[in-house]
Image (tube, helix red, strand yellow):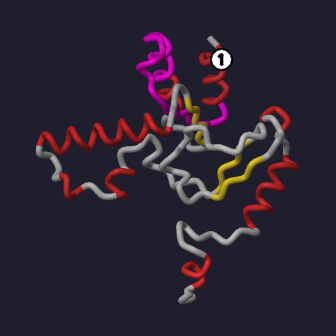
Amino acid sequence: EALDREVEELHANRVRLRVIGNRQRLAVRLQQRIAEAEAKTAGNGGLCLQVAVSYGGRWDVVEAAKRLAAQAASGAIRASDIDEERFAAELQLADLPDPDLFIRTGGDHRVSNFLLWNIAYAELYFTDLLWPDFDAAELQRAIEDFTGRERRFGLTGAQASGSKK
């Protein structure tokens, strides 16, 4: 019922709803309501609200591997065709760029099985604030911290600057 109420507001504000995660773990009726909500908002051209329900980064990676294995077994692709780009195309968020900044609230200094592949080169920001207390000032601190970092995308500082050390 809450989903039904919220989807009307999302639709009125031209927000597209997208739910990622293992829907098979949800009740059939809830799966149907999610599909209906996504269909209703699919054509909306404003913001996209992505909600993770029963999502885990390991699950996402395993499901992508299963799809690629099935494609290889059926002859649709060769195992040698599988590279990082092909693998990433099978993940839940394949149509979106990887996050640049990952913010973790609540004082925990871990990613907790969230977007494991996608945040490989993201900058991580940890705050002791709990999510309900995360405000514009803390977001500003996270952005300032992010802008002061050297983005290396897996390289060492010397490699990123082109030095030969």
Identify the image quadrant of the C terminus: bottom right
How many marks on residues?
Answer: 1
At a point 51% along the width and 50% down the height, the residue shown is 118
Residue 153's place in the image compared with 54, above or below, is below
In the depicted view, which residue is nearer to us: 19 or 47?
Answer: 19
For residue 30, side relative to residue 48 (left or right): left
Residue 143 falls in which quadrant of the image?
Answer: bottom right
Q: What range of the chain is rendered magenta?
A: 12-36
x and y, in percent, of residue 6 in the image: 65, 22
At a point 78% along the width and 61% down the height, the residue shown is 145
Residue 72 falls in which quadrant of the image?
Answer: top left
Secondary element at image label 1:
helix
x and y, in percent, of residue 116 in the image: 51, 46
Q: Is residue 20 magenta?
A: yes
Residue 165's place in the image compared with 62, above or below, is below
Q: Which residue has dot 1 on it?
A: 5
x and y, in percent, of residue 106 in the image: 77, 37
Q: Amino acid at mark 1?
A: Arg
At a point 16% along the width and 53% down the height, the residue shown is 78
Identify the image quadrant of the N terminus: top right
Q: Is residue 92 magenta?
A: no
Residue 40's place in the image compared with 146, above or below, is above
Residue 160's place in the image compared with 82, above or below, is below
At a point 55% along the width and 67% down the height, the residue shown is 153
In the depicted view, which residue is nearer to us: 90 or 29?
Answer: 90
Number of other residues with Cα within 10 Å of mark 1, as a class: few under 14, some 14 to 19, many 20 or more: few
Q: Residue furthest right?
A: 137
x and y, in percent, of residue 16 in the image: 56, 36
Q: Residue furthest bottom?
A: 164
